Amino acid sequence: MSIEERRRSRRGFAHAATTVAAAFAVALALAGCASSGGTSASTSPSESASTGALPPVIVDLGDADGTTVEVAVGHSIDLVGDDEHFTEWTAEIADPSIVEFVPGHDDGSAQFNPGLTATAVGQTEVSLSNDASGDEVAFTVVVTE
């Protein structure tokens, strides 16, 4: 093997190692935001040390139907699991003073999932529908202090 081939091989290994390290860091960061997979999801009271932002409660649209989601007032619920029709979701909220629906959107540089923002302590029913996919999801949101 020539010196040039060894350099290319080392560069390839360094690039692969960097890619694996970056993927591992992203996976750890995402794992910290994921819910436990039960019928209730909640956030921890801690704030992110680097940004001061509170993490959202992650709710998979495919698993949410019939569940109860718990979130602290001022926090948000990120509705994930629909990469194709995420901009088409709409919501009917029984008590819109408790949570506010935020539609999914694409600003051309990034895609944003639909979500809910907890605005007051209480409990409300949320019904989501997506005319493009035909999907419907209904669940209860409990907003705590």
Image (cartoon, helix red, strand yellow):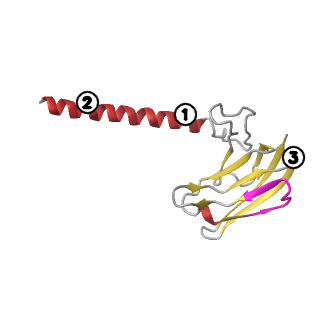
Q: x, y (%) of residue 135?
A: 65, 64
As drawn, 86 above or below 47: below
73 is within the stretch colored magenta: no
Q: x, y (%) of residue 78?
A: 67, 50
For numbered disc 3, what is the local secondary structure?
loop
The 10 Å Cα crowd at callout 1, few under 14, some 14 to 19, many 20 or more, is: few
At label 2, the amino acid type is Arg
Range of residues picked out in magenta: 91-101
Q: Which mark is residue 28?
A: 1
Q: x, y (%) of residue 139?
A: 76, 54
Given this view, does label 2 or label 1 mark the residue nearer the observer? 2
For numbered disc 2, what is the local secondary structure?
helix
The 10 Å Cα crowd at callout 3, few under 14, some 14 to 19, many 20 or more, is: some
As drawn, 82 above or below 2: below
The reply to whether callout 3 and callout 2 are in contact (CB within 8 Å) is no
Q: Disc 3 designates what residue?
A: 121
Q: x, y (%) of residue 88?
A: 63, 66
Nearer to us in this view, 25 or 62:
25
At label 1, the amino acid type is Leu
Specify the quadrant of the image occupied by residue 38: top right
Q: CA distance from mark 1 to mark 3?
A: 31 Å
Task: Compare marks 2 and 1 and give the one earlier in the sequence.
Answer: 2
Task: Compare marks 1 and 3 and give the one earlier in the sequence.
Answer: 1
Residue at the spot x=66%, y=57% of the render? Answer: 114
95 is within the stretch colored magenta: yes
Task: Compare marks 3 and 2 and give the one earlier in the sequence.
Answer: 2
Residue at the spot x=64%, y=70% of the render? Answer: 131
Q: Disc 2 designates what residue?
A: 10
